[in-house]
């Protein structure tokens, strides 16, 4: 299969995922990556940040969505805004720090054009020089570019860059219940993000990482050394840091454990792995916490919240959450072979501080590039990226338990967590967005 001219050849793009297999060009082609940024990430709802990161007027964070630099900022009316971090004049970035406070306006450091936090143009330097020039009808007079949609759901901020596409609720559907579960782990229904995140760059395609989030077969072999180490030092950990022990030991669970955990796929590539139980289901109780939740939400809802602890919930294509231990992962694709990973832990407001500590401990143990777990995955992801570009079989196989009559883009629950349907479901969504032309194309 030739990797050129994909933009003009819809059938060629469709052929990259067929019969439960993914062609290597989906992982190594620069052209495919460019189309992904435009058609997939440009039209999907992407995670921006959490409202607790911008508590006061003028507070902002910066990040990128589909390669586009954006600012998430708190307006004077308490609204959380998202605007493109690019001056309407000559394109200079307005702010450069990861976070800060903009004061009363966004002001470009190049020529001092200034903007309201909603992106509207506030002032230009030497204003009289633009009279009778057609400036009022120009694109620059419209101010900063704003995404086609911005939604804040239970404190989580999402944006869709494209001006057209599915609504927030239609795109995510029932998977939003996972965010309800996270927020309701707080007696007040609100979360606060930790002060810092674990941020790393992996030399692999973003889809490799996203597939692995739903891969229940690899822990037994890939992380064998991590679970063996946990067992060998178990007595020491049990006395000094029992949280670390109970978070690492489940990685040694056998195939049968994952077979019985259950899974659910949803339209648009979303999924829930561990609908019955997961490696997070048996964490020790935090003294007094259950009573706090029961008093706040009622005994029935409190029990429902605490019993629901999926392995991973994927908000396709850029976010994965863990209700317990209150951790999210965010993927920011940088290039076809380069992916930035962000890991954030949360504190449920009104709950014991142990909850945040549990999430931060898990993040360091499992997702830090220097951890006893993540370095196994990163080593294999990067070896995949190198090897797929070489001669040999051009297909990545995702056919475990595939059926000829398998429904696509539908809500399906099934018992076996080892079924690679959760991965195939991602590629059904991938193929759909990749082959639907953007407006005006």
Image (cartoon, rainbow, N blue to C red):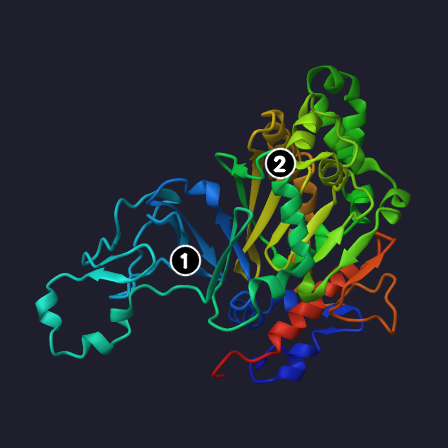
Residue 169 vs residue 318, the one in the foreground: 169
The residue located at (64%, 29%) in the rendering is 358
Which corner quadrant holds the N terminus? bottom right
The residue located at (68%, 34%) in the rendering is 372
Q: Which residue is mark 2?
A: 363
Q: CA distance from mark 1 to mark 2?
A: 26 Å
Q: Is residue 318 left or right of residue 287?
A: left
The residue located at (80%, 59%) in the rendering is 420
In the rendered view, tell whether residue 322 sits above or below residue 131: above
**Circle on res. 69:** 1
**Circle on res. 277:** none
SS state under label 1? strand
Residue 27 image point, x, y percent: 64, 64
Q: Is residue 28 left or right of residue 137?
A: right
Neighbourhood count class around disc 1 (C-alpha, 10 Å): few under 14, some 14–19, many 20 upward: some
Residue 126 image point, x, y percent: 10, 63
Can residue 390 be seen by looking at this rendering?
A: no
Q: Is residue 224 left or right of residue 153?
A: right
The residue located at (52%, 37%) in the rendering is 192
Q: Quadrant of residue 284?
A: top right
Residue 300 vs residue 373, the one in the foreground: 300
SS state under label 2? helix
First reached walking from the N terminus: tag 1 or tag 2: 1
Q: Are marks 1 and 2 in contact (CB under 8 Å)?
A: no
Residue 392 image point, x, y percent: 75, 67
Residue 252 vs residue 135, the one in the foreground: 135
In the rendered view, tell whether residue 408 sits above or below residue 168: below
In the rendered view, tell whether residue 243 sits above or below residue 271: above
Residue 39 image point, x, y percent: 55, 72
């Amino acid at each position: 299969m030739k990797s050129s001219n994909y933009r003009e050849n819809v059938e060629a793009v469709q052929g990259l995922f067929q019969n439960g297999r993914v062609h290597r060009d989906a992982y190594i082609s620069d052209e495919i990556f460019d189309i992904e940024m435009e058609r997939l990430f440009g039209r999907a709802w992407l995670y921006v940040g959490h409202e607790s990161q911008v508590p006061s007027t003028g507070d902002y964070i910066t990040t990128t969505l589909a390669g586009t630099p954006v600012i998430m900022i708190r307006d004077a009316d308490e609204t959380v805004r998202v605007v493109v971090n690019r001056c309407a004049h000559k394109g200079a970035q307005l702010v450069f720090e990861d976070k800060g406070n903009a004061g009363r306006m966004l002001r470009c450091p190049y020529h001092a054009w200034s903007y309201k936090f909603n992106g509207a143009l506030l002032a230009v330097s030497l204003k009289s020089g633009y009279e009778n020039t057609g400036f009022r009808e120009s694109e620059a007079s419209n101010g900063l570019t704003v995404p086609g949609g911005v939604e804040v759901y239970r404190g989580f901020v999402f944006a869709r860059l494209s001006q057209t596409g599915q609504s927030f609720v239609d795109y995510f559907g029932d998977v939003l219940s996972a965010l309800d579960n996270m927020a309701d782990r707080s007696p007040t229904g609100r979360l606060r993000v930790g002060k810092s995140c674990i941020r790393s760059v992996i030399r692999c395609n973003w889809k490799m990482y996203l597939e692995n989030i739903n891969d229940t077969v690899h822990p037994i072999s890939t992380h064998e050394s991590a679970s063996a180490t946990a067992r060998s030092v178990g007595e020491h950990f049990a006395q000094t840091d029992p949280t670390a022990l109970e978070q690492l030991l489940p990685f040694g669970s056998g195939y049968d454990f994952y077979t019985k955990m259950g899974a659910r796929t949803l339209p648009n590539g979303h999924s829930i792995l561990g609908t019955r139980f997961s490696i997070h289901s048996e964490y020790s109780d935090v003294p007094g916490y259950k009573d706090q939740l029961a008093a706040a939400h009622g005994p029935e809802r409190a029990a429902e919240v605490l019993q629901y602890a999926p392995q991973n919930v994927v908000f396709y294509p850029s976010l994965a959450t863990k209700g317990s231990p209150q951790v999210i992962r965010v993927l920011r694709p940088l290039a076809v072979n380069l992916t930035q990973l962000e890991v954030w832990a949360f504190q449920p407001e009104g709950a014991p501080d142990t909850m945040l500590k549990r999430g931060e401990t898990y993040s360091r143990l499992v997702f830090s590039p220097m951890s006893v777990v993540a370095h196994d995955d990163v080593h294999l992801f990067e070896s995949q990226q190198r090897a797929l570009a070489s001669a040999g079989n051009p297909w990545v196989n995702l056919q475990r338990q595939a059926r000829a009559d398998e429904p696509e883009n539908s809500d399906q629950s099934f018992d076996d967590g080892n079924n690679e349907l959760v991965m195939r479901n991602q590629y059904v969504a991938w193929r759909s967005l990749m082959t639907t032309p953007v407006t005006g194309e």
